[in-house]
């Protein structure tokens, strides 16, 4: 009789766990991670109460719980929770609860807070994943013919590389014509694309940062004239647990640091002049306020490596499609380059996408000027561009072009003058395609250290 009761209890517990998991639409997702706090995210299928339990990995004791959030239809049933009061450089386990029931997963759900290293010791090595162009097929709304998206296993293979975080460079969804005119349509697209099984482990085990590009924002090649842009930005922020938007700016512009690198995430759509506009002498992609913020932030940055993240290519000299050289935006491009030169800003690396191919461009005008890099990574699961080799990009580094689905892992490794960036490009199966190394400009002055790195007897 006792065995029967235990058996029935096990069945009831299993059914309860299954019922709670059935309420989970997608996630959980780890958002921005700081030294003492983290932002976690989840989406339910209907109104529910969401919270997280968390505890220091490897330690026993009572678990702490986050604030409880009630998901609502108008927010796409999404929940974002900030957990603070954490220890720096510490790994935490976390658990998702929906309606007070734990949701279990076949993989460990953990996050690690950032280290307090400046003025204490050398920054640790770290790595991050990067790329763009994440088309997910939806036969109900897609064009007839061969599916444009595919090979979703790429997201599983990014997770298997265990990056410290991931940066999504726009076109993270592809809004269809029936969707960009309404909030419910945009929510539908995010919900559909976020829910594929291949993304779930990546969402739950790696912190994520993201920008918008045209397909997240509205129609193809959309710009600041798009009438529903505030709604698309609103929904973007519902589905991405981002840092706070830079003060004084609209759209989706963010900034965050990780060890000795700083990331400037730009919005190349909200303030953008139309491509077809010809009467304006000084056209802008970034807008006056965002451009000034970028310049000020780059000058103020104490980071060894400064990553400027934006959709479309910055250095590519070809006047094709989404390059800064095209559609009358070349003057703003030259203005940014001239500013980097005048202020002698070293180790500025543009991280770009959109073009459905990957390549590395370098602007090197000799020792009198700092080098400027542009690393383009695209696409994840969208259709590849197989004609890029014919583009007259004078700054492309020979041998770096990739014309297939891929992602990149940036490894920031080494100490002092030997600190460098090793970039590994992988195909959808996680197989290495190419690798490339960027060495730092040596006129960089690091943070002063309190102690030598050598151990003293």
Image: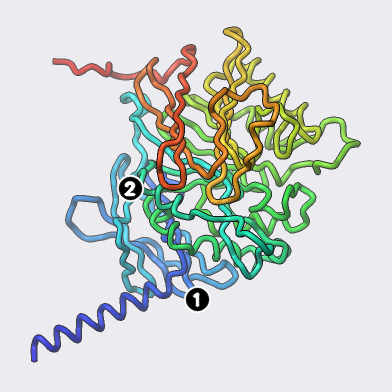
Q: Is residue 200 above or below residue 339?
A: below
What is the number of the mark on residue 392? none
Placement of 154 over or under 126, stated as above or below: below
The one nearer the camera, 244 or 224, is: 224
Compared to residue 259, the image places residue 225 above or below, namely below
Q: Position of residue 169 (x, y in %)?
A: 57, 43
Q: Please state which of residues 411 and 393 is positioned toward the viewer in this rendering.
A: 393
Residue 166 vertical position relative to residue 367 in the rendered view, above or below: below
For the N terminus, the quadrant is bottom left
| Mark 2 → mark 1, Cα distance in angstroms | 31 Å
The residue carrying pointer 2 sits among few (fewer than 14), some (14 to 19) or many (20 or more) residues within 10 Å by Cα, namely some
Disc 2 or 1, which lies upstream in sequence?
A: 1
Question: Residue 329, image x and y in percent?
Answer: 77, 32
Q: In front here: 6 or 409?
A: 409
Numbered disc 2: secondary structure:
loop
Mark identifier at residue 46: 1
Residue, x 74% and y 49% (percent of image)?
222
Residue 67 location (% of width, % of height): 40, 63
Occupied quadrant, residue 457: top left
Residue 410 shown left or right of residue 397 in the figure? left
SS label for mark 1? loop
């Amino acid at each position: 009789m006792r065995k029967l009761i235990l058996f029935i209890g096990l069945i009831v517990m299993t059914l309860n766990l299954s019922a709670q998991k059935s309420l989970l639409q997608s996630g959980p997702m780890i958002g921005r991670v700081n030294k003492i706090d983290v932002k976690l995210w989840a989406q339910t299928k209907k109104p529910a109460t969401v919270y997280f339990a968390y505890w220091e990995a490897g330690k026993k004791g009572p678990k702490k719980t986050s604030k409880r959030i009630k998901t609502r239809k108008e927010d796409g049933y999404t929940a974002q929770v900030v957990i603070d009061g954490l220890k720096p450089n510490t790994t935490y386990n976390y658990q998702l609860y929906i309606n007070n029931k734990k949701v279990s997963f076949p993989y460990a759900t953990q996050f690690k807070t950032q280290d307090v290293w400046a003025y204490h010791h050398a920054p640790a090595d770290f790595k991050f994943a990067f790329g763009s162009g994440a088309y997910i097929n939806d036969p109900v709304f897609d064009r007839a013919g061969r599916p444009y998206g595919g090979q979703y296993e790429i997201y599983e293979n990014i997770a298997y590389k265990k990056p410290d975080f991931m940066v999504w460079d726009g076109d993270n969804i592809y809004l269809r014509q029936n969707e960009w005119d309404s909030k419910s349509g945009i929510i539908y697209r995010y919900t559909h694309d976020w829910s594929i099984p291949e993304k779930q482990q990546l969402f739950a085990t790696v912190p994520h940062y993201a920008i918008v590009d045209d397909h997240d924002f509205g129609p193809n090649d959309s710009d600041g004239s798009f009438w529903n842009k505030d709604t698309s930005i609103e929904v973007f922020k519902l589905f991405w647990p981002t840092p706070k938007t830079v003060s004084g700016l609209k759209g989706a512009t963010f900034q965050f640091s990780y060890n000795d690198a700083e990331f400037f995430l730009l919005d190349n759509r909200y303030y953008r002049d139309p491509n077809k506009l010809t009467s304006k002498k000084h056209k802008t992609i970034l807008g006056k306020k965002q451009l000034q913020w970028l310049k000020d932030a780059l000058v103020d940055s104490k980071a060894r490596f400064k990553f400027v993240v934006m959709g479309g290519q910055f250095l590519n000299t070809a006047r094709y499609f989404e390059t800064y050289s095209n559609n009358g935006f070349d003057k703003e491009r030259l203005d940014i380059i001239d500013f980097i030169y005048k202020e002698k800003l070293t180790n500025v690396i543009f991280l770009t996408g959109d073009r459905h191919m990957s390549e590395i461009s370098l602007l090197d005008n000799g020792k009198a000027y700092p080098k400027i890099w542009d690393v383009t990574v695209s696409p994840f699961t969208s259709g590849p561009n197989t004609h890029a080799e014919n583009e007259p990009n004078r700054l492309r580094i020979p041998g770096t072009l990739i014309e297939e689905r891929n992602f990149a892992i940036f490894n920031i490794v080494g100490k002092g003058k030997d600190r460098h960036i090793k970039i590994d490009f992988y195909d959808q199966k996680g197989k290495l395609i190419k690798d490339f190394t960027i060495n730092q400009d040596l006129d960089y002055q690091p943070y002063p250290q309190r102690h030598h790195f050598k151990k003293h007897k």
